Amino acid sequence: MACWIQESPWLKPKPSTVARGTGQATSMSGQPGATSREKKEKEKAHPNYVAAASRRSGTEWTEDCRKSTYPPSGPTYRGPVPWYTINLDLPPYKRWHELMADKAPALKVIMNSLKNMINAFVPSGKIIQIVDQKLPGLLGNFPGPYEEEMKGIAAVTDIPLGEIISFNVFYEIFTICTSVITEDKQGHLLHGRNLDFGIFLGWNINNNTWVVTEQLKPLTVNLDFQRNNKTVFKASSFAGYVGMLTGFKPGLFSLTLNERFGVNGGYMGIIEWILGKKDAMWIGFITRSVLENSTSYEEAKNILTKTKILAPAYFILGGNKSGEGCVITRDRTQSLDVYELNPKQDRWYVLQTNYDRWKSPFFLDDRRTPAKMCLNRTTQENISFATIYDVLSTKPVLNKLTVFTTLMDVTKGQYETYLRDCPDPCIGW
């Protein structure tokens, strides 16, 4: 994997403390009588100090735009993602049995990790007891086929239904992602995304990884949802989760979901649901419903713009012809902004991380700036699966939370997902 270097204000290192020495090199010989200041300057000149200073400045966690990372290989590529068929002609209770029979051990690992984290804060075990015994009743009936599907997953994995429900609820509040839709000079659209998940859910100090992020990788699957032996839509997800965050309907549209941070966020929606106010849709369920049932880009955009949802979100939607690409910024009750491709105004891509486009991203989590820089350097003439993968492979767009990268070409019916790694030095988010 090549990395090409060109100085830019974003990448330019801050002046190093080491470079601001006293200039008294001859007095830093380590001879007896050296002053404490001279000893400190000598420590600063040591390679270990330089490395530590670089880590603190953050320059090791960034890099210039990657090139030639596709087809995936090397240290940032964990491996392929397996395909499974979900037969929508089966009763909901049975649809996930084959997949979950394979993935039950991996799902139990992650559920045990989540329980251990919760028990670390509430050692009595009462929180888990409430989840196992009370959560299904508290949340009540889920819409459509989703409740029966979760019951079927609980049965085949021998995991309590409450824990399966909690595993599905997590994605309403913990997903951090980067999504992009591009249009080339011929009007051809491509859609790419990094799915980042697991922040604050346990840090492994032995290998510098997020515990849950790593445990999700064996659960990552590509899904071919079929009816009458024909594909309805394809998606990438985690075994045990019945909503969708990433997918496309071949020939029609592509859709990804990014979390939107807000005070009136997913927690409030869940509380209202428990209290009986159930006039909003779970965001993972609305995404799946659109992928399964909508028949055009415009129909999907209309639903995603107007339907009340439990948590704020960004819906990144791509179509099959020029100009059909947008980022829908949502709060729980309405659309705040629809930002669309406009090739006539040289807007040949739309990009979304987890911050409103009219606001600056959090300074410790600026994936937007490097992603835009790399897209602009790529140019519209050179956009392809390969160059989008390069952008999504550039730190910090690629980071310790990145589970997988998906590339979608609606018109050609191409759908590719790859497990990712971010070797050190790599920022935690």
Image: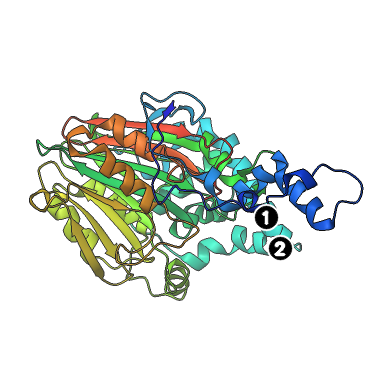
Where residue 199 appears, x then y in whole percent?
A: 55, 53
**Quadrant housing the N terminus:** top left
Query: What secondary structure is found at the residue carrying circle 2?
Result: helix
Pick the front one: 346 or 230: 346
Image-based side of 160 in relation to 365, left or right? right
Where residue 346 appears, x then y in whole percent?
A: 13, 50
Where residue 29 appears, x then y in whole percent?
A: 81, 42
For the point 39% across and 65% down, the residue is: 311
Image-based side of 393 in relation to 89, left or right? right
Pick the front one: 329 or 149: 329
Bin the neighbour count of mark 2 within 10 Å (Cα to Cα): few under 14, some 14-19, many 20 and up. few
Image-based side of 412 in relation to 241, left or right? left
Residue corresponding to mark 2:
121
Where residue 120 appears, x then y in whole percent?
A: 73, 58
For the point 33% across and 42% down, the residue is: 374
For the point 76% across and 62% down, the residue is: 123
**Which amino acid type is shown beneath numbered disc 1?**
Met
**Which amino acid type is shown beneath numbered disc 2?**
Phe
Q: Which mark is residue 117?
A: 1
Against 231, is 342 above or below? below
Bin the neighbour count of mark 1 within 10 Å (Cα to Cα): few under 14, some 14-19, many 20 and up. some
Q: Do the residues under discs 1 and 2 have CB atoms within 8 angstroms?
A: yes
Report if residue 95 is visible in the image: no
Image-based side of 396 in relation to 35, left or right? left
Q: Locate residue 285: give its quadrant.
A: bottom left
Question: Which residue is outermost to the right?
Answer: 32
Pick the front one: 37 or 190: 37
Query: What secondary structure is found at the residue carrying circle 1?
Result: helix
